[in-house]
Image (cartoon, helix red, strand yellow):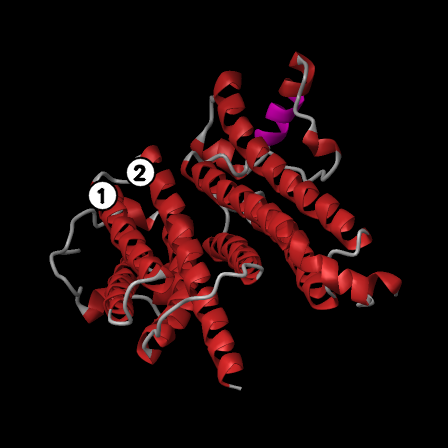
Amino acid sequence: MAAFADTPAMTASRPSHSGAIRAWLAMVAVLVIAMVVVGGATRLTESGLSITEWKPIKGTIPPLSAQEWAAEFEKYKQIPQYVKMNLGMSLEEFKFIYWWEWSHRLLGRLIGVVFALPFLFFWLRGWLTPKLTLKLVGLLALGGSQGLLGWWMVKSGLADRTEVSEYRLAMHLTLACLILTAIAWVASSLSEERDAGSVPGAARAIAYLLVPLILVQIFMGGLVAGLRAGLAYNTWPLMDGHFIPTLGNLYIMAPAWVNHFENTLTVQFQHRMVAYLIVALALLQAWLAARGGRGPARSRAMLVAAAALGQAAIGVLTLLLVVPLWAGILHQLGGVLLLTAATVNAQRLTAGASSQLSARA
């Protein structure tokens, strides 16, 4: 209990350590971003099912001999993806997809170590307040659940399918981005910077709305990836010959709600529409924030707007080129960078509003 107690000496020392804690969380955030990007590459290269077992400790070491490689390859040959999609694949081709999945899993383990060890150090040194400790324990629990969710996702493609479930893929991607959002929020909250000048209430409301909206868009992107919906309807701004496809095609499946998750036309269409909404809101927020004068809030709003426009442009390019590997990876990176920028912006506006209320009190 002593580690959680707020003694005067500990309370006085904590502010001087906030910079170190913030830098540590920023490092973890960068690793999570890398994890999401490598995960996207793993999906695009059809590598996610190349490792058919989950061994959290032993799995850290890849095959080191010809016999071990042959054994891993033999396990892969037993699943439907090999039989139906990759029959006759060479060992070298298998190694290519194996290394992508192994790197993805290794990054997950690395994130766990990079988070847990410094957290333990900071806690034992008494650098963490009870409130911050609780937040960090929550982040650690989310990270552990992400590993379990990842294996649950992989299992969906080992028995009767040639790919993982699009539902589980979207959940896995969204949880990773939710973890990134939480890390960025906590890290930003440790900053002592306070915004100068006023920000219109509408701009604040949009900033708060953008974060969950981008997370919803990322979930939809996971569905697009899981269904390979980006390989169809590769025209823009029209799709299937229309800006808004006919209702008969959008709701061709029964029951109607299934179309939003399993109809490639509907899934891609709603991904496009939410992208337009995000860009419009980001531009409106930037315009409203600019009315509050110069300062960090205006700069952050401009950054979010630029990131939204850039991400939309990359998305269109990825679609028109029929999802080449480099464009797909760049699109996934753009999404998490936009989410990070929107999260920091929303948190700093929250901090600014709190400091203004305190000043008035």
Q: Residues within 10 Å of mark 1 (few under 14, many from 20)?
A: some
Q: Can residue 219 be seen in this view?
A: yes
Closer to the camera in the image, 86 or 149: 149
Residue located 69% across and 31% down the image: 60
Q: Can residue 128 be seen in this view?
A: no
Q: In this view, does 290 lie to the left or right of 58?
A: left
Question: Which residue extends farthest top?
Answer: 66
Percent across and percent down for residue 323 are: 29, 40
Whether 187 is drawn above or below 205: the answer is above
Q: Mark 1 points at which residue?
A: 317
The image quadrant that residue 112 belongs to is: top right
Q: Mark 2 points at which residue?
A: 327
Percent across and percent down for residue 122 are: 74, 51
Q: In this view, does 335 lie to the left or right of 126?
A: left
Percent across and percent down for residue 154 are: 57, 45
- For marks 1 and 2, give the CA distance: 8 Å
Going by the numbered disc 1, the residue's amino acid type is Leu
Q: Are marks 1 and 2 in contact (CB under 8 Å)?
A: yes
Closer to the camera in the image, 271 or 88: 271
Labelled disc at residue 62: none
Q: Is mark 2 on a helix, strand or loop?
A: helix
Question: Which residue extends farthest left?
Answer: 241
Q: Is mark 1 on a helix, strand or loop?
A: helix
Closer to the camera in the image, 295 or 112: 295
Residue located 47% across and 78% down the image: 356
Q: How crowded is mark 2: few (under 14 residues within 10 Å), some or many (20 or more)?
A: some
- Which residues make up the magenta segment? 71-77
Residue located 24% across and 62% down the image: 276
The image quadrant that residue 277 belongs to is: bottom left
